Amino acid sequence: MSETAETYDASKYERPSVTVDVVIFTLLDSRLHVLLVQRKHWPYADHWAIPGGFVNMDESLETAARRELAEETGVHDLYLEQLYTFGEPGRDPRTRVISVAYFALVRSEEQHLQVSDESNDVRWFSVDELPSPLAFDHHKILRFAIDRLRSKLEYTTLAFQLLPTEFTLPALKRIYEEILGEKLDKANFYRKLRDSDLLEDTGKFLEGRGRPARLYRFRDSRVEGDFVFRHREARVKVKQEQ
Amino acid sequence: MSETAETYDASKYERPSVTVDVVIFTLLDSRLHVLLVQRKHWPYADHWAIPGGFVNMDESLETAARRELAEETGVHDLYLEQLYTFGEPGRDPRTRVISVAYFALVRSEEQHLQVSDESNDVRWFSVDELPSPLAFDHHKILRFAIDRLRSKLEYTTLAFQLLPTEFTLPALKRIYEEILGEKLDKANFYRKLRDSDLLEDTGKFLEGRGRPARLYRFRDSRVEGDFVFRHREARVKVKQEQ
DNA sequence: CTATAATAGTGTCATAATAACACTATAAGG
DNA sequence: CCTTATAGTGTTATTATGACACTATTATAG
């Protein structure tokens, strides 16, 4: 960030390439899935990869993320959150690539996937059945994203983004259970939600197998943010995170 | 992340520059301070800025952050944490610059500041008395860092990094109070610490004005990590973060 | 040499949050 | 109309929290 004069020469230093990569989560068949594209070209041809691509000179990182995602997968209209920036030398065989990773949650029913001519295929993969190996260091990025997702679930309303406008408490509880990988107590979970004042009763019901479930909606239309909602208390413990 | 063949031409796309910027906090006269350097050259000559600089092609982002910090300020030996990546077009008048920001806490007594020939001066500033305007979008980065620091204080042992190996409970409490900007209850704060099992009694005492304070040390030498320690319970509330 | 100020540290208790689990409610299907 | 499946509520023992009053140990002023 220091240069000698107005005579700054932009081409003086060799520059790394900058990409954005986007980890998109959804719930499919009640399982957490992630969106991957199958690469067509070198490097890592035929390998599955997190969608992403190079940042143009005149667009913001988030705009680039949105553009690449739409181009490569057809996914659009989502709340993106910056995850981490990966920049180890050697992570891309072509040249030095620094990759700003984003992540987001979407409702898969609302997304129509489409394959670009840069890839063979675009597909949702259960996070428990990922293809291996993934391209580049994408396995690491994915791990990072899943960890972050779990941890943010503990104190935000992130999970609500996976639900339609109107939803039932059991559905929300199932999402938490699937992502956290553990069973939650119904009574305690519902009580937290009632006390949180986040939900609004629609008066409607969802018919199903047993007793119909009451339909709620998020009180605020701002589901796209990070609201504080602890589904349970975080205990004091000593452990390393990340 | 997709290219047509082994014929990939690294110079084909115009590339942004990548810098690392490092927000260093310390406690000085019981106040939270941040390290700034006064720029010597265009752009923003004579403005104060967060230390940082361009990433070399063969070094990792964190290595670059460490190197720049040592070169520009003399500060070394610290636990760095990635903060956020800022990449709006136009944030640097020279060219498109994407900046990966890091932050860290240090004990100022252990650091000997030294000015590089790229800057006029290096100095600690109280976060309440920052020079204005700062270079580039560094004010925004600083805000971001302070917010993150406060929020991580709530559930990590980050603050312990500001203390020497052996320290007293009142000293630790003062750090929390200064950074959070609010008074904490002694009894409750000490109880949390006792229950957390993070500390070890050294058997020694620190003499002072009144009753001598018992000296503790962190039980683990791994103060340089992110341990979970909630100095108080986080309450359920609905608010937007960041 | 005693009183006071200053700082460190402990005890207590009403209230709230938590976790566990037993219970009731309402539907479908045989 | 009995069984199963799902939704939803009540209850209670235990623990965590916040507030605040109390005790302890030193230096220093007079």
Image (cartoon, coloured by chain):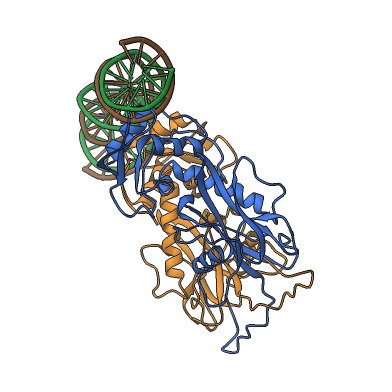
Chain colours: A blue, B orange, C green, D brown
Quarter of the image for residue C13 reads: top left
**Along the horizontal axis of the image, is A201 left or right of B138?**
left
Out of B194 and A215, give the one closest to the viewer: A215
Could you tell me residue B68's position as x and y percent?
Answer: 62, 67
Q: Give the mark count.
A: 0
Out of A231 and B161, give the one closest to the viewer: A231
Residue B30 in view of the camera: yes
Residue sticking out furthest to the bottom = A7
Q: Quadrant of the N terminus of chain B?
A: bottom right
Q: Is residue A192 above or below residue A92?
A: above
Quarter of the image for residue A204 reads: top left
**Along the horizontal axis of the image, is A142 left or right of A203?**
right
Could you tell me residue B190's position as x and y percent?
Answer: 39, 34
Out of A109 and A91, give the one closest to the viewer: A109
Query: In percent of the image, x 50 and y 71: which residue is there?
Result: A60
**Along the horizontal axis of the image, is A172 left or right of A46?**
left
Q: Is residue A142 above or below residue B117?
A: above
**Along the horizontal axis of the image, is B10 left or right of B86?**
right
Could you tell me residue A31's position as x and y percent?
Answer: 53, 40
Residue B203 in view of the camera: no
Q: Is residue B67 above or below residue B234?
A: below
Query: In percent of the image, x 38 and y 34: which residue is there?
Result: A170
Could you tell me residue B8's position as x and y percent?
Answer: 75, 72
Q: Quadrant of the C terminus of chain B?
A: bottom left
Q: Is residue B186 above or below residue A159?
A: above
Query: In percent of the image, x 33 and y 40: which residue is there?
Result: B235
Residue sticking out furthest to the right = B6
